[in-house]
Image (cartoon, helix red, strand yellow):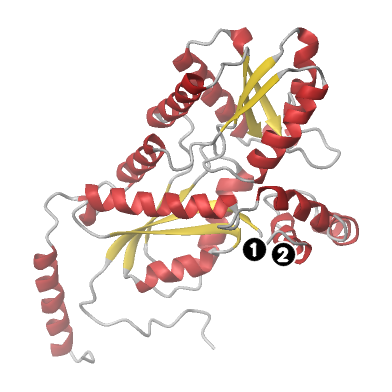
Amino acid sequence: MSRFINEQDYFHGKADSAGVLLVNLGTPDAPDAPSLRRYLNEFLSDPRVVEIPRLVWYPILNLAILPKRPAASAEKYKKIWTEQGSPLLSISRQQQAAIQKELERRFQGPMKVELAMRYGNPSIRNSLLKLKAEGVRRLLILPLYPQYCAATTATSFDATFKELQRWRWMPELRTVTHYHDHPGYIEALAQSLFEYWNKNLRGEVLVMSFHGIPKRNLTQGDPYYCECQKTARLLAENLNLRPNEYRVTFQSRFGKAEWLQPYTDKTLEALPKEGVKSVDVICPGFAADCLETLEEIQLENKEVFLQAGGQQYQYVPALNTSYRHIQMLCDVIQQHTQGWAETSPDWNGQTLQKQAELTQKRAQDQGAKP
């Protein structure tokens, strides 16, 4: 049996198009223990996520983590689950639709946009097959992680390339590895804060909380920490913040190893002792609100700050489907798809259709099946 997917729907002269695969981390199908077990097993089995030898890690995962953690994680998800389901998936779907609409406005030719999750559904495999069915022959992979990290960006590429290994005819590929210092991204973050402060009393200190990774990853060459710091510096400069008016921290540590510091929860616990009674927290590394922002930051860390003596704690939502965010993402797509026929102002569907018909006739003259 062939290892490759058969091109059963292929025929000479078939119209082709360009496509964009948006990739985010993932979400369980439901806020219950069985769904979390499937999700966590897939997530924590990824060697990009946990860089521990498999012979050491798998017993820990299967005997210590998976028997207990899914139930605890399910309770956390229940706190943020909505009528539309997972917030991350719901928001990501809205982002997909908004980006599709904006690209149709910008480009003459067809540019198909699909959403995939690295872990869970919709899977990268199924979303790629949808793009394939749409005739996508030029594909841009856009992981929705502003800062590059092997455990997020690289593993998204891994899963995409693994699926494409099954294709007999691979599309032309382009990738976006990061956009942590894109001017539109920094401006979108700044404007989200200005708009929030126009409606709410501004805190004394702005905490910029990024997802953490083991410190060992930094020393072995992962640029994530440096890109987080650059994002924070550019945002602070845009906001004209003095050094004492903001903190850069890292959240969501897991296990006993040292992770990137300072830790978000420890920082929030210490600030009231330094005389800071009000804080605003923003998470610039998340393109959409999810468990780590809505439960960990908005709920858990608020309790940490208030119990330590703080008086006012405000979480500033992720960029989600804000106008500037969608425009910025489309700017990134437009930048990385330059030269493709669909992006040309001279694109003409009728001309391409005539060319396709001519191609089909020539192939049939050479013996191809109709």
Instruction: Give the residue pinned by disc 2.
Output: 35
Q: Residues within 10 Å of mark 1 (few under 14, many from 20)?
A: some
Q: Residues within 10 Å of mark 2 (few under 14, many from 20)?
A: some
Q: From what the image shows, is residue 185 above or below residue 346?
A: above
| SS for dot 1 | loop
Q: Earlier in the sequence, mark 1 or mark 2?
A: 1
- Left or right: 34 as drawn, with respect to 167: right
Q: Nearer the viewer, residue 70 or 364?
A: 70
Identify the mark at residue 29; answer none if there is no mark. Answer: 1
Q: Nearer the viewer, residue 35 or 184?
A: 35
| Quadrant in which the C terminus is drawn | bottom left
Identify the residue shown where x is 55% and y is 22%.
232
Q: How many marks?
A: 2
The reply to whether callout 1 and callout 2 are in contact (CB within 8 Å) is: yes
- Left or right: 236 as drawn, with respect to 363: right
Residue 212 visible, this angle = no
